[in-house]
Image: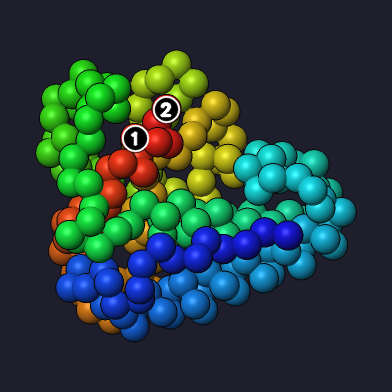
């Protein structure tokens, strides 16, 4: 049984970056619905006991195309939002910059953390329609940035040995109540509540 993460902060604790109504709808409605439907589809497909990563990495094994698409969308919606909500913290608590091995790798590949943020924001802002911007780690420790449509992620896209480090949700439900059409403003502000200590843990 897959469970959505319980938010380690109150729904109004991410303000002013993300308003309480957005957190309540996003986590309490959208993410809850993805999780519920994913559980139903997993049971229907006879995949109970497998991890979400495993299921999404092996979608080709599901012969029923409707079921396969459902697992891809709902499973991605379940997993991606766990990654997203877990990495956020109230502005006063969030670790504002990475240290150690992750910082060293970012500087080596991107020049600086600011350059990485610029690249990721541009990537996520350019996603046509709903989707995600990602920072991820390859098995050899190098970092990779990419964007995905809908609820796709590295697993459903068949990117072997790629583990998500940060997930930027650019579905309109993530920002539209407060930022309206200004996706770039949301992305810029989002960095104020991204907790780099979570990213460091994921990078290990
Ligand atoms: Mn979302």
Q: Secondary structure at mark 2?
A: loop
Q: Position of residue 25 (x, y in %)?
A: 43, 80
Badge 1 local density, few (<14 within 10 Å), some, or many (20+)?
Answer: some
Badge 2 local density, few (<14 within 10 Å), some, or many (20+)?
Answer: few
Query: Disc 1 beta carbon < 8 A from ligand 1?
Result: no
What is the quadrant of residue 180 in the picture? bottom left
Query: Disc 2 beta carbon < 8 A from ligand 1?
Result: no
Name the side, left or right, on which 151 lies relative to 21: right
Q: Quadrant of the C terminus?
A: top left
Q: In this figure, what is the number of numbered marks?
A: 2
Q: CA distance from mark 1 to mark 2?
A: 6 Å
Q: Return the residue at label 2.
A: 204
Q: Quadrant of the N terminus?
A: bottom right
**Foreground of the two, 107 or 72:** 107
Q: Residue at x 60, y 68 (%)?
A: 34
Q: Is residue 126 visible to us here?
A: no
Q: Position of residue 91 (x, y in %)?
A: 19, 60
Name the side, left or right, on which 66 lies relative to 145: right
Q: Position of residue 31 (x, y in %)?
A: 52, 69
Residue 52 vs 36, above or below: the answer is: above
Q: Residue at x 21, y 64 (%)?
A: 186
Q: Residue at x 73, y 54 (%)?
A: 68
Q: Return the residue at label 1.
A: 200
**Foreground of the two, 133 or 89:** 89
**Foreground of the two, 56 or 49:** 49
Colouring rule applied to residues: rainbow
Q: Is residue 29 visible to us here?
A: yes
Residue 107 vs 175, above or below: the answer is: above
Name the side, left or right, on which 58 lies relative to 179: right
Q: Position of residue 90 (x, y in %)?
A: 25, 63
The answer to whether marks 1 and 2 mark residues whose Cβ atoms lie closer than 8 Å is: yes
């Amino acid at each position: 049984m897959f469970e959505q993460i319980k938010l380690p902060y109150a729904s109004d604790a991410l303000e002013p970056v993300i308003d309480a109504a957005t957190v309540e709808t996003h986590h309490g409605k959208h993410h809850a619905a993805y999780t519920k439907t994913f559980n139903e589809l997993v049971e229907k497909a006879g995949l109970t006991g497998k991890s979400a990563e495993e299921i999404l990495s092996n979608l080709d094994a599901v012969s029923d195309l409707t079921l396969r698409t459902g697992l891809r969308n709902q499973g991605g919606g379940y997993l991606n939002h766990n990654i997203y909500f877990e990495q956020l913290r109230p502005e006063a608590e969030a670790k504002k910059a990475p240290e150690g091995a992750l910082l060293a790798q970012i500087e080596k590949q991107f020049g600086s953390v600011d350059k990485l943020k610029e690249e990721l924001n541009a990537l996520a802002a350019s996603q046509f329609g709903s989707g995600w911007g990602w920072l991820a780690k390859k098995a050899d420790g190098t970092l990779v940035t990419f964007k995905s449509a809908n609820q796709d992620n590295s697993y459903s896209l068949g990117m072997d040995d790629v583990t998500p480090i940060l997930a930027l949700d650019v579905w309109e439900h993530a920002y539209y109540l407060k930022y309206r059409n200004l996706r770039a403003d949301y992305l810029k502000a989002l960095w104020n509540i991204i907790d780099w200590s979570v990213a460091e843990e994921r990078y290990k």
